[in-house]
Amino acid sequence: MTQRYNIAVLVSNKGTGSNLLAILGKGFQVKIIIADSQDAPGIKIAKDKRISYRVLPYLRPKNLEIAEYRNQYSKEIGKILRENKTDLAILLGFNRILAKPYFENFCRKTINIHPG
């Protein structure tokens, strides 16, 4: 019996989406793709493959310290992953630094593939 995992993939607007296509080509079932930009190639792939996706732009307000915004952003990603009952998050060229609120729930459930 094959065990299924709820996989989430986090992407940025750099690259071509080739790593995402490779994962999908190996038969992995990606439940949701999270991008930090609407321009991320992963969004087009999500639409083409009919995979759920969310765009969570990284737009820090000028009145917010970097560390505070990074914590808020990381917390929001964690919330999306929990809502999708994510077993494994794969960062495919995700170009953001995730903070402690993310790793409190997903420390041992995350694989980072360059550059982060």
Image (cartoon, rainbow, N blue to C red):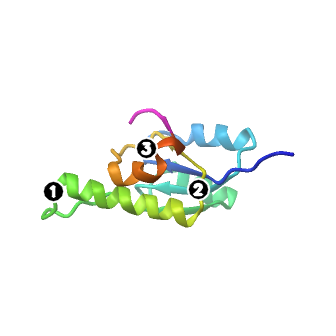
Q: Nearer the viewer, residue 98 or 62?
A: 98
Question: On the picture, is 94 further left or further right than 86?
Answer: left
- Amino acid residing under circle 1: Glu
Bin the neighbour count of mark 3 within 10 Å (Cα to Cα): few under 14, some 14-19, many 20 and up.
many
Label 2, residues with CA under 10 Å away: few <14, some 14-19, many ≥20: many
Q: Callout 2, which amino acid?
A: Thr
- Would you place residue 82 above or below residue 114 in this image? below
Residue at point 45% right, 64% down?
A: 79
Res 114 → quadrant: top left
The residue labelled by disc 3 is 94
Q: Is residue 35 magenta?
A: no
Please give the residue where the numbered disc 2 appears in the rendered image: 86
Residue 40 place in picture, x, y as percent: 47, 51
Extreme-left residue of the structure: 63
Per the image, label 3 sits on a secondary structure element best described as loop
* Amino acid under disc 3: Phe
Q: Considering depth in this image, is 17 or 66 the residue closer to the camera?
A: 66
Name the residue rendered at 37%, 60% in the picture: 75
Disc 2 from disc 3: Cα separation: 17 Å
**Horizontal and vertical percent for residue 110?**
51, 42
Could you tell me which quadrant the C terminus lies in? top left
The residue indicated by pointer 1 is 65
Task: In the rendered view, tell whether residue 113 sits above or below residue 88.
Answer: above
| Mark closest to the chain's N terminus, 2 or 3 | 2
Q: Are marks 1 and 2 in contact (CB under 8 Å)?
A: no
Q: Residue furthest right?
A: 1
Element type at mark 1:
loop
Q: CA distance from mark 3 to mark 1?
A: 21 Å
Would you identify the image quadrant in which residue 33 lies?
A: bottom right
How crowded pointer 1 is (Cα within 10 Å; few <14, some 14-19, many 20+) is rated as: few
Question: Quadrant of residue 83 in the image?
Answer: bottom right
Q: Magenta residues? A: 111-116
